[in-house]
Amino acid sequence: MALVPYEDTALWGLQKLHKSSSVYRFANHTIQITQNWKQLGVAAVVWDAAVVLCTFLEMGSIDLRGRLVIELGAGTGLLGIVAALLGAHVTITDRKAALDLLELNVQANLPADLQPRTTVKELTWGQGLAGFPPGAYDFILGADIVYLEETFADLLLTLEHLSSDHTVILLSCRLRYERDQKFLKMLQGRFSVHEVFYDPSNDVHIFKAQRNGWKGDL
């Protein structure tokens, strides 16, 4: 699943993660996200990295209208929902256990006319990739999906399968541990990687990655 695991008693500031819902305002819409920490843990709460990437997308430097977008490790689905509200055709993915909550949030927060442009689909990195068209996506989004070193190779394989020369990958994360830096080095071995945004209040970085040799703009 996406996101970094924490113990229940780790930090008092994480109490907000245990609430049954959280409310956000993006793309002129109020978005109420249902959370379920007790049942699903880290995959069922909204993390700062997702909020920061939503804010970055809303800033408007990227035009998502009509673009094909896929979100990896979507968790509650906030990021994919915002991408759809900004005009994208979005495939929102996570592992099977997260899909019911993910679908619930998508249905509850997208207007009826936008729901046909949004698909919730199971994806475990490195598996079943034939079910996803290779290189078909304009943008690949991921928020706090870099945390388990044993998933790094499968995540890179998935990114390579889903991307083409024109694809922009946007990864939002905190750099908490040495292994996070290790993943960035692995990513740099296969893609051109640049930091495009940093939120100091949340200590969240956004990295843009594209296939090596691509010189296009965001």
Image (cartoon, rainbow, N blue to C red):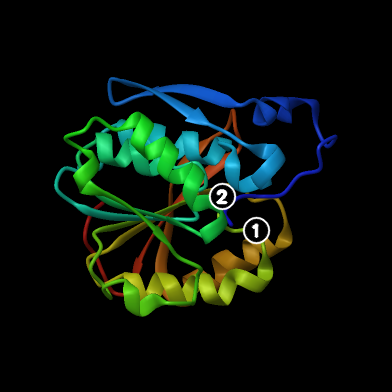
- Return the x and y of residue 162 as percentages of the image width and height: 33, 70
Q: Residues within 10 Å of mark 2 (few under 14, many from 20)?
A: many
Against 112, is 23 above or below?
A: above
Asked if residue 215 lies left or right of residue 195, the reply is left
Residue 105 visible in the current orientation: yes
Choose between 197 and 41: the one closer to the eye. Answer: 41
Q: Which residue lies under the disc numbered 1?
A: 147
Q: Residue 79's image quarter?
A: top left
Q: For the point 34% across and 79% down, which residue is it?
A: 130
The amino acid pointed to by label 1 is Tyr
The answer to whether the residues at label 1 and label 2 have Cβ atoms under 8 Å apart is: yes
Asked if residue 95 lies left or right of residue 136, the reply is right
Q: For the point 44% across and 23% down, which residue is it?
A: 24
Q: Residue 71's image quarter?
A: bottom left
For the N terminus, the image quarter is bottom right
Q: Which residue lies under the disc numbered 2?
A: 144
